[in-house]
């Protein structure tokens, strides 16, 4: 079994059906794939808050709550998603959700799959995943999202959007600058990468794959060592 440290970022909405019901079959399938333990080493999963968190945040904004308060709701919901996955993985998962890098360092001593959510206001869970990957010297960060990778424009709005199979950090920076007038995502706003995550990426020099987590077929192929997968690869 190859020794390989890996961080997996999974969007919170991927844990739910389109009707916003928890997707038990999808969660079980995700656990089944990782339980194969193709690789030894550290394995950390970072959960996003997803659409449910965004609904809470929208209501908080309606009640005139500020963005810092909205962030705390997003963090709490991402940690609830993490607890859900811990319950699904059962005894092969570390039983607590680390709430800081210090708590993560303790969890690593137990040799189990570690599942986390957000860490602090103003930081997306993608940035958390990058920071964690940097901390454990991960060979790769896998980002599971609801599209097949990163496109030249929003594939949900444009039918002619083109999947970009390989990007450099400079390419990614240009996409972020062109797609958004405000470079930092607001609380609960979904972006695969924002300016903060880009800066962590550039300093850590991580290798990243962004792929669909809708049916987990590409992720299972990846976890089994198949390089012929549909995704976007980001390298220095």
Image (cartoon, grey):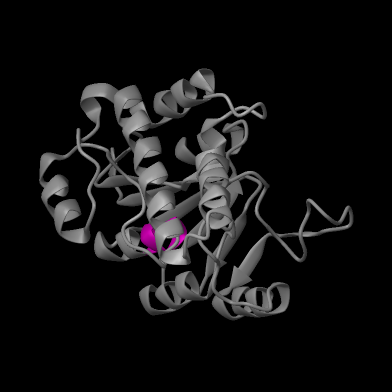
Magenta span dominant secondary structure: helix
Vertical order, 15 against 139 (above or below) = above
Q: Is residue 8 magenta?
A: no
Vertical order, 140 against 91 (above or below) = below
Q: Nearer the viewer, residue 62 or 56?
A: 62
Q: Give the mark count.
A: 0
Relative placement, left or right, of 48 versus 62 is left
Q: Nearer the viewer, residue 59 or 146?
A: 59
Residue extending furthest top? 25
Q: Nearer the viewer, residue 97 or 140?
A: 97
Q: Name the residue: 55% across, 76% down.
A: 169
Q: Name the residue: 58% across, 39% down.
A: 213
Q: Name the residue: 32% across, 33% down.
A: 83
Vertical order, 192 against 180 (above or below) = above
Q: Nearer the viewer, residue 186 or 173?
A: 186
**In which image quadrant can residue 112 be found?**
top left
**In which image quadrant can residue 122 be found?**
bottom left
Say if residue 44 shows up in the picture: yes
Relative placement, left or right, of 3 versus 210 is left
Q: Name the residue: 47% across, 45% down.
A: 49
Q: Position of residue 192 (x, y in %)?
A: 57, 59
Relative placement, left or right, of 204 versus 114 is right
Say if residue 226 shows up in the picture: no
Residue extending furthest right? 160
- The residue stretch that appears in magenta: 125-130
């Amino acid at each position: 079994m190859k020794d390989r440290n890996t961080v997996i970022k999974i969007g919170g909405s991927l844990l739910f059906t389109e009707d916003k019901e928890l997707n038990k079959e999808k969660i079980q399938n995700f656990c089944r794939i990782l339980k194969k333990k193709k690789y030894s080493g550290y394995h950390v999963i970072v959960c996003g808050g997803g659409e449910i968190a965004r609904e809470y945040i929208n209501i908080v904004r309606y009640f005139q709550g500020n963005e810092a308060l909205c962030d705390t709701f997003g963090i709490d919901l991402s940690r609830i998603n993490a607890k859900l996955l811990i319950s699904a993985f059962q005894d092969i998962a570390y039983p607590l959700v680390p709430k800081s890098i210090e708590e993560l360092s303790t969890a690593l001593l137990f040799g189990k799959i570690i599942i986390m959510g957000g860490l602090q206001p103003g930081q997306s869970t993608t940035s958390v995943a990058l920071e964690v990957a940097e901390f454990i010297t991960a060979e790769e960060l896998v980002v599971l999202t609801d599209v097949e990778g990163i496109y030249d424009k929003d594939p949900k709005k444009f039918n002619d959007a083109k999947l970009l199979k390989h990007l450099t950090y400079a390419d990614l920076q240009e996409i972020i600058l062109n797609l958004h007038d405000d470079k930092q995502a607001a609380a609960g706003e979904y972006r695969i990468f924002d300016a903060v995550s880009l800066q962590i990426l550039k300093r850590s020099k991580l290798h990243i794959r962004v792929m669909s987590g809708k049916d987990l077929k590409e992720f299972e192929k990846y976890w089994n060592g198949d390089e012929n997968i549909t995704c976007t690869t980001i390298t220095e």
